[in-house]
Image (cartoon, rainbow, N blue to C red):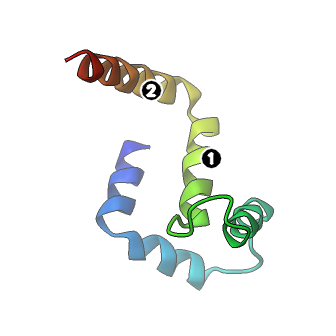
Amino acid sequence: MLFLLREIIRKPELLVSKTEKHRKKLNKFVLYFDRLKQERLIRSDVDSRYIYVIIHSLCSFPLMNGIVFSYSLQFLRRSMMS
């Protein structure tokens, strides 16, 4: 998962080009977040496809993500106390 995120951050146009190439119909989840962006309930600079990838990875790899989140929360707490 970290590899995928690193690649998306490094070259975001790859995700766009892959999804455009194989585009059939937009996922209902992506459409939902597009609607929220139009209603200005979420920031407009966030791509709905990225949200989909992140939430999908959270559901697909819960154990690994649990470890990542616990370390990031520990880091956040330490940085707030300093």
Q: Residue, x 61% and y 64% (percent of image)?
A: 48
The answer to whether 78 is drawn above or below residue 72 in the figure is: above
Image quadrant where residue 81 sits: top left
The answer to whether 64 is drawn above or below residue 9 in the figure is: above
Residue 69 numbered tag: 2
Gap between marks 1 and 2, in whole Å? 15 Å
| Mark 2 Cα-neighbour bin, 10 Å: few <14, some 14–19, many ≥20 | few
Farthest residue to the bottom: give it. 21
Secondary structure of residue under mark 2: helix
Q: How many callouts does the rendering have?
A: 2
Residue 12 lies, in percent from the top left, at: 39, 70
In this rendered view, identify the residue nearer to me: 21 or 34. Answer: 34
Q: Residue, x 19% and y 18% (percent of image)?
A: 82
Instruction: Left or right? Give the position of 24 relative to 48.
Output: right
Q: Residue, x 50% and y 69% (percent of image)?
A: 45
Residue 5 numbered tag: none
Q: Looking at the picture, which amino acid does disc 2 mark?
A: Phe
| Mark 1 Cα-neighbour bin, 10 Å: few <14, some 14–19, many ≥20 | few
Residue 52 lies, in percent from the top left, at: 62, 56
Residue 43 lies, in percent from the top left, at: 56, 62
Residue 56 numbered tag: 1
The answer to whether 45 is drawn above or below residue 6 in the figure is: below
Q: Looking at the picture, which amino acid does disc 1 mark?
A: His
In this rendered view, identify the residue nearer to me: 11 or 31. Answer: 31
Closest to the camera, between mark 1 and mark 2, is: 2
Image quadrant where residue 25 sits: bottom right
Secondary structure of residue under mark 1: helix
Q: Residue, x 37% and y 43% (percent of image)?
A: 2
Residue 67 lies, in percent from the top left, at: 43, 21
Position of the N terminus by quadrant? top left
Farthest residue to the left: give it. 82
The answer to whether 61 is drawn above or below residue 5 in the figure is: above
